[in-house]
Image (cartoon, rainbow, N blue to C red):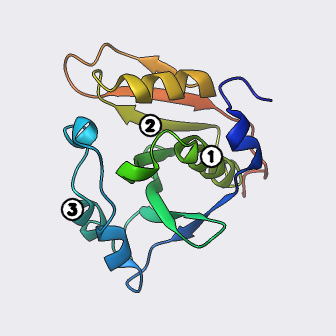
Amino acid sequence: MVFGQTAREDTMNIRLRQIDRHHKEEFMDANVSEELERFMSRNLDTISGNGPTSDYAPYAIMTDEGRMVGFIMIGQKLEEGSYWLAKLMIDTCERRKGYGTLAMRQAIQMLKESPGCTSVQVTYHRDNVAAKVMLDHMGFVSVGDGKDGPIVATLAVACARPQES
């Protein structure tokens, strides 16, 4: 078992499905807990900022039974050459079951297969202790104290594919 992984995660399977116009309504119904609400933008704001020219894409986190339990934003900032996990949201009734950790691992694997990927970055609010603990367990290194904005955490990764020339 990997450090930070629960026994339940060993038997759970999820898949990430890109959210398109056909799945937006299901996505809008996902609820974040009141304690985390202050750290996140609304789902509607998140999805509306992603069009065909955006470098970010929302993915639904789906169980084996086809139930959506949350979503994650995956993208890149071409001008910086960086890859980002911009938002992770697990529905209130599905929290603390390992879905967030599994989604993060799958998203990181997807990004590792992107040309030139050497690191994955995520930001979090300094008061979001759950995010800090999960990121620390996954090997992310945080920079800053969060007094002047979000904390940036970086995970160095080995590319699964060589960079295209």
Q: Nearer the viewer, residue 34 or 46?
A: 34
- Quarter placement of the N terminus: top right
Instruction: Name the residue beneath numbered marker 1.
Output: 102
Report, in whole angstroms, how far the alpha carbon at label 2 lies from the one at label 1. 16 Å
Looking at the image, how many numbered discs can be counted on the residues? Answer: 3
Residue at x 38% of width, y 34% of height = 123
Kindly tell me whether residue 53 is visible in this rendering: no
The image shows residue 69, relative to residue 116, as above or below, that is: below
Sequence-first disc among 3 and 1: 3
What residue lies at 28% left-to-right and 44% top-to-bottom?
Answer: 33
Q: Which of marks 2 and 1 is nearer the N terminus?
A: 1
Kind of residue at disc 2: Val
Residue assigned mark 2: 122
Q: Residues within 10 Å of mark 2 (few under 14, many from 20)?
A: many
Identify the residue under disc 3.
Answer: 45
Distance from the alpha carbon under mark 2 to that under mark 3: 18 Å
* Horizontal relation, residue 141 to residue 159: left or right: left
Q: How far apart in space, not on screen, are marks 3 and 1 (Cα)?
A: 24 Å
Q: Quadrant of residue 52?
A: bottom left
Is 77 situated left or right of 106 in this image?
A: left
Percent position of residue 147, x then y: 20, 16
Quadrant including the C terminus: bottom right
Horizontal and vertical percent position of residue 72: 46, 54
Secondary element type, mark 1: helix
**Mark 3–mark 1 CB contact (< 8 Å):** no
- Residue at 22% in and 43% down: 37
Which x, y percent locates residue 119?
59, 36
Tag 3 secondary structure:
helix
Determine crowd level at label 3: few under 14, some 14-19, many 20+ residues with C-alpha closer than 10 A.
Answer: few
Residue nearest the viewer, comparing 37 with 20: 37
Q: Can residue 71 be seen in this view?
A: yes
Q: What residue type is labelled 1?
A: Leu
